[in-house]
Image (tube, rainbow, N blue to C red):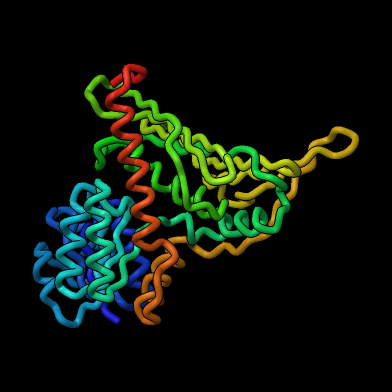
Amino acid sequence: MSIGLVGAGRWGENLVRNYLQLGVLSQVCDHNPETLKKIAFKFPTVRLTNSYSKILEDSSIQGIIISTPSTTHHQLAKQALLAGKHVYIEKPLARTEEEAIELIKLADSLDLTLMVGHLLLYHPAVNKLKELIAEGVLGEIRFVNSDRRNFALTRMDTNVIWDLAPHDLSMISYILGKEEVELVDANGFSTLNDGIIDVGHLDIKFESNIYAHIHNSWIDPQKQCLLTVTGSKKTAVLNDTRQDGKLELYSITADGQIFIEQPAYSNEEPLRLECQHFLDSIALGKKPLSDGIGGYQVVKLLAQADFSMRNSNKNFI
């Protein structure tokens, strides 16, 4: 199998590393000469180009990896599908519901794989948590809180929720096994008064009246990736900023003491598992775990939240 990649920036470099180690990366494309120089220095065996059309015209390339700003996702993915290539596209799938639906229908009509980079669905600790929830270890799920913050030196997306919330939305839906999600409330703040929302709060509701809160921020110098799932028996805390012991279960003993457990899970790199899954999906002709439908559901809710934040007098934008 031969793969081409477009967009070799900060995150794209990680994809280059993984697909190169998997032995399938054929060409890397980026319009920035400095980015290509950096890739050439770190990965001297990779063929480089600044022409996306050259990759699309290469009949030996079966799949395209798209790791570019989200506003370009739809057009680049559409071109790749029309060229007969399987497509892995970083989150979010698109920027509108209509764009997402068009890509899904196009991929289906051409019998091509369309996979979205919802990375946390391939995270061993997340999958362990999903398993514990399904087994009833936490009891009845009462509330979910996801806190994802960092210090954004560059703002590649139009606001923070398009950048960070796809992780939270896809992960929460996945671990709960719930597909239907409803936006309850959305608030956004532009701390630089430039119209760009850099702090966002989303309140959402899943099936069975399970509520969740998502907090995203671009203004925190201390990175935070913290998921808390509160159940009637135990509360799970997944702290992805830790090197080890990311997943812990908290419960209260009969004598009022807090008891902490650390479930075991594999230490495989989530991105490597995700990249391999894309290759397997192509080889086996199966729908990927993070398929276009899941990508559409995330885009739909983000579009609703974005509209709500920009048209509410509760926001500071």
Q: Nearer the viewer, residue 211 or 289?
A: 211
Is 161 above or below relative to 123? Answer: above
Judge by depth and name the residue closer to the eye, 41 or 207: 207
- Does residue 221 appear left or right of residue 158 in this picture? right
The front one of 37 and 21 is 21
Q: Position of residue 228 (x, y in %)?
A: 60, 40
Residue 67 position, x and y percent, is: 26, 57
Q: Residue at x 42, y 36 (%)?
A: 183
Residue 37 appears in the figure? yes
Quadrant of the image occupied by residue 105: bottom left
Q: Residue at x 38, y 48 (%)?
A: 298
Above or below, 270 against 239 in this view is: below
Q: Residue furthest front?
A: 208
The quarter of the picture where the N terminus appears is bottom left
When asked about the image quadrant of residue 259, the answer is top right
- Identify which residue, 140 or 33, lies in the foreground: 140
Pinpoint residue 55: horizontal percent, then vertical percent: 14, 71
> Horizontally, is 290 left or right of 113 in the view?
right
For the C terminus, the image quarter is top left
Q: Quadrant of residue 87?
A: bottom left
Residue 228 as seen in the image, left or right of residue 51: right
Confirm whether residue 168 shows in the render: no
Q: Residue at x 28, y 62 (%)?
A: 104
Residue 276 against residue 42 in the figure, above or below: below
Which residue does the image show at 40% across and 81% down from the upper left? Answer: 284
Residue 43 x/y as whole percent:
27, 67
Position of residue 283 in the picture relative to residue 266 (left or right): left
